[in-house]
Amino acid sequence: MTEDLLPERLARAITLAGPIPLSQYMAAANAHYYATRDPLGAAGDFTTAPEISQMFGELIGLWLTDLWSRAGRPAARYVEFGPGRGTLASDALRAMGKTGLAPPVHLVEFSPALRARQAERLPQAEWCVDLVGVPDDGALLVVANEFFDALPIRQLVKTAEGWRERLVACQDTLFLPVVGNTVFDAIIPPALKDVPDGSVLETSPASVAAVRQLARAVAERGGAALVIDYGYEGPAIGDTFQAVKAHRFANPFEQPGEADLTAHVDFATLAEAARAEGARTYGPVGQGAFLTALGIDARAAALGGGPEVTTARDRLVGAEAMGELFRVLAIVHPDWPVPEGFA
């Protein structure tokens, strides 16, 4: 598939069959986007926490090690969803190795471009498309950093005629959101039924399915998972669908496949889905409070505490930066200890 064909393919599908759900548009755009580039870093479209400082991955590695050690040091496997360039895994595994934990590494990644970058840092890794590809001979130590925000969402819009789904229509190759005809009033939470017209409710069936598979595996095999992303505790009203290109916000309906499409994560829904599969959950808590509880200040001092380290620390934990917007949720086997950082 050549890089400039996705808009034409989507336009043709919409012309032939009519407007498509926003979730279908988002899934197609992100599949193309991630398959065709390395989007990270100054030359890319966005920067994630592991790329800001090694402290982030190191502290996550130590969090996993502490929990694993208190659980009796069982056989375990490290699994990361959406591992980017492999930076987080590399830093986490280095910290884990210093304490005697060196698990096999499994990366859940679809993008050929990113798999190539991950192989440079993690030549020992194996790749899979979900947890089914991970052998079930040990506990799971799972990390999902900025993974769920890129999974497709559905949007329901309150209109004078009731709640309708937001669809994507097309005129030539100009994409635009429209409201469908099917009424969805029956599935709206009671607390949200009387909100003003124009209100938007977001759901992500793909995220619920992913977290249920993850929680089920943790509950069956043992282990823990850490989910880190920007989001909120729902249900809540608001349109968070957005595009980022060259470190700036962009129009998500322009040039599909050429920008990162994301939405804020509903952590309350993820936690509820995880508990339904037999796992325990902790949080969510703010990323700033979590990293502070794990000792980021001491780690920054150990790295010299210079201006570069201090700036990185402030970006990771500052309330005006990532500290409050990003949330952390732990999903833990019911017989494992209470994890650190969720007091």
Image (spheres, rainbow, N blue to C red):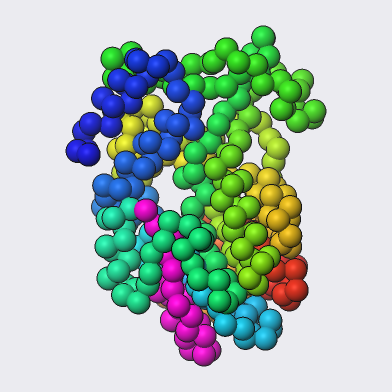
The residue segment tinted magenta is 88-110
Q: Is residue 269 left or right of residue 306?
A: right
Find the residue positioned furthest to the top: 161
Residue for point 28% across, 14% down = 172
Residue 107 falls inside the magenta stretch = yes
Residue 142 falls inside the magenta stretch = no
How many marks do you count on the picture? 0
Q: Position of residue 58 (x, y in %)?
A: 49, 75
Q: Is residue 69 above or below residue 105?
A: below
The front one of 176 and 47 is 176
Q: Position of residue 136 (x, y in %)?
A: 55, 71
Q: Is residue 268 above or below residue 81?
A: above
Residue for point 45% across, 31% down = 24
Does the image show residue 9?
yes
Q: Position of residue 134 (x, y in %)?
A: 49, 67
Q: Is residue 28 left or right of residue 235?
A: left
The front one of 268 and 195 is 268
